[in-house]
Image (spheres, rainbow, N blue to C red):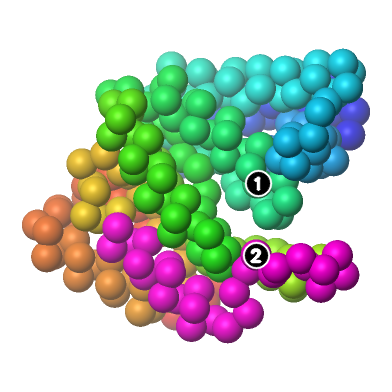
Amino acid sequence: EEENDLDKVMYETISSIIKAKNQENIPFAVFKPSGLARFNLLGKISSKKELSPEQNKERIDFEKRVECICKTSYENKVPVFIDAEESWIQDAIDNISLKMMKKFNQKSTYIFNTIQLYRRDRIKYLNELITYAKKGSFLIGVKLVRGAYHEKEIARAENMGYLCPVYKIKKDTDRDYNQAIETCIKNIDIISICAGTHNEESSMLLIKLMKKYNIVKNDKRIYFSQLLGMSDH
C-alpha cells in the first residue's frame, strides 16, 4: 500500500531479472502487478472511473514501475511474466501488458501476460491480442493457466449481483484451456507460450500439436511449466 514498499517490489523484481541473466536454470522472472500499485487503484482504473489528481499520479507511478521492469527484461534478454489477478482489477493489468508488449516485443518476446482460462471472456481476449499483434507488427507472450481465484470470483459475483465472470463447471475451463493452446500453436509465428498446467490431457495436447506442426522440442517459443513439488508424478 505504501510508495516505498511498491518501489521495493520493483527493485526486487529487477534484481531477480539480473540474477536470471546469469543463471541458465532460471529462464524467466515474474511479478504481480498488485505489488506495484495499490489493489484498489487497479480496481478503479479497471472500472474506468475518473481518477483524482492523486490517483492519477499513482497510476503514472505504477506504469513507470512496470516499464522499468520490462525495460530491464528487454535489455538483459530475460523474459518476464506479468501475473494475472482478480477479474475486477485485470483490465488495468491487460492494458499495461499490451502497452509493454508493443514496446519491447518487436523482434523477440520478452513480455508475457497471463491468461486465466476459467474466465468466460479469455478466448475472445486471446483472439483480440492476436489481431492487435498482426496490425501492430509486434510479438505476443502468453502464459496460459486455468485460474487462481475461483471461489473468490464466484462469491463476489453472487454478493454483488453481477454475471459470474468464471466458469463454474471444470470441463468448460478445460475446453477453453485446450482451445487456447491450439490457437497459440496455430499462430506460433507471432506467439510465445508458457503452458502453466499439471493437467495431463492439456500437456499431451500441446506435445501432439508440436509434433503435428513440426515444432522441435527445445523451441524457445514454447515452455511447459509446473509448480515444484505439486503433482510430482
Q: Is residue 164 magenta?
A: yes
Q: Residues within 10 Å of mark 1 (few under 14, many from 20)?
A: some
Provide residue 94's location: percent of width, then percent of height.
57, 40
Figure quadrant of the C terminus? bottom left
The stretch of residues the image draws in magenta is: 157-183
Q: Quadrant of residue 119?
A: bottom right
Vertical side of 36 occupied by 151: above or below:
below
Rendered residue at 51%/64% (across/down): 117
Specify whether 111 is left or right of 92. Answer: left
Residue type pointed to by label 1? Gln
Rendered residue at 26%/39% (across/down): 190
Vertical side of 105 occupied by 184: above or below:
below
Q: Residues within 10 Å of mark 2 (few under 14, many from 20)?
A: some
Provide residue 95's location: percent of width, then percent of height.
57, 34
Q: Are marks 1 and 2 in contact (CB under 8 Å)?
A: no
Provide residue 78's location: percent of width, then percent of height.
43, 30
Specify whether 122 is left or right of 84. Answer: left
| Badge 2 element | loop
**Residue 30 shows in this picture:** no
Vertical side of 36 occupied by 82: above or below:
below
Q: Is residue 179 magenta?
A: yes
**Residue behind mark 2:** 165
| Badge 1 element | helix
Provide residue 83's location: percent of width, then percent of height.
60, 46
Rendered residue at 42%/25% (across/down): 102
Rendered residue at 44%/20% (across/down): 103
**Residue 138 shows in this picture:** yes
Residue 90's label in the rendered image is 1
